[in-house]
Image (tube, grey):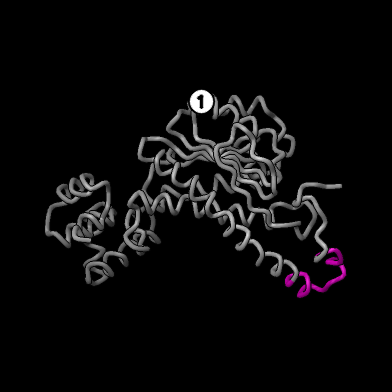
Amino acid sequence: MINKITEQQNPNSQDIDKKNILGILHVINNEDQKVANSVRLSIPFIETFVTNVIDSFKNHGRLIYIGSGTSGRLGILDASECPPTYSVTPDLVQGIIAGGKDAVFRSIENAEDNERTAIDEIKSMNINPNDSVLGITASSKAAFVMAALKEAKKAGAFIGLLVCNNIEKPKFVDILIEAPVGPEIITGSTRMKAGTATKLILNMITTTAMIKMNKTYGNLMVDLRAWNQKLWDRGTGIISLLCGLSQAESLNLLVKCDGEVKTAVVINKLNISVESARQLLAENEGSLRKVIDPAQ
């Protein structure tokens, strides 16, 4: 008997090879619709982990993802998107994958069994009690992930574990996030529903943490730093929306502020200098709302 849900055969796709292309696509889509509900049921546990991530950030700590295969790649993907989206340093959110950088681009299946490498990775990162560490393993079987979490726990970090099965919480884990999405369309292919659930949860973790770290104004990405044309256009649009300026006026203001959207908005709203705007934001923990809407 196979206990892991992700390794069980899915009765809804047993004859998938007999279906035409349209039929296969419908089977996949029908199964994918179950993922969001599974994630919804795990929200109270995600909340606990996010609360600790925010505390980590406020105390100069980090969020570190650890995974192998698809799980590791998703952690790295989420971490890599934080600097351009929220103007944070690359070390604030980091991803570790079994097998190192090569495993990002090609599968190194036996890497997930290497406990010694996992321990060495954690030691090299100087994990401390201000850090939050999330292990990601769909089946909960990845030895690399579990060994890394045990080592991070020894260093005093807050430990989370994200799985897509129902398991008993390991003693060294502070919070267990379970998102049991059911058997995969292709048996054991956890890059599918389990991967989708993982991506949704990682999005929730970093997005919520960044919102509470004053990286947005409403749902606007005001803490972005314009590095490319897309971000210059987005930043200009945000300034135009918040300040009622033309696109040309907004662009000129953004250029004056070296691509810093928050600074540009404060200058326009309060009619102060660039340096004064930066100082005011710093004094208010980077909160644009506190600076321009102090009564709210």
- Magenta stretch holds residue 21: yes
- Tell me where residue 110 sits by quadrant: top right
Q: Nearer the viewer, residue 257 or 18?
A: 18
Instruction: Give the quadrant of the C terminus.
Output: bottom left
Amino acid found under the numbered disc labelled 1: Ala
Image coordinates for residue 222, horizontal then vertical, percent? 32, 58
78 left or right, relative to 165: left
Q: Nearer the viewer, residue 151 or 104?
A: 151
**Mark 1 residue element:** loop
32 left or right, relative to 263: right
- Tell me where residue 199 sits by quadrant: bottom right
Q: Residue at x 18, y 45 (%)?
A: 279
260 left or right, relative to 144: left
- Magenta stretch holds residue 48: no
Give the crowd class for mark 1: few <14, some 14-19, many >=20 residues within 10 Å. some
Relative height, residue 219 to residue 165 (above, below) = below
**Magenta stretch?**
13-26
Image coordinates for residue 177, horizontal then vertical, percent? 59, 47
Image coordinates for residue 12, horizontal then vertical, percent? 80, 66
Count up the numbered dots. Answer: 1
Q: Residue at x 75, y 69 (%)?
A: 27
Specify whether residue 225 is in view: no
Q: Main secondary structure of the magenta part?
A: helix
Relative height, residue 116 to residue 253 (above, below) = above
Q: Which residue is mark 1?
A: 155
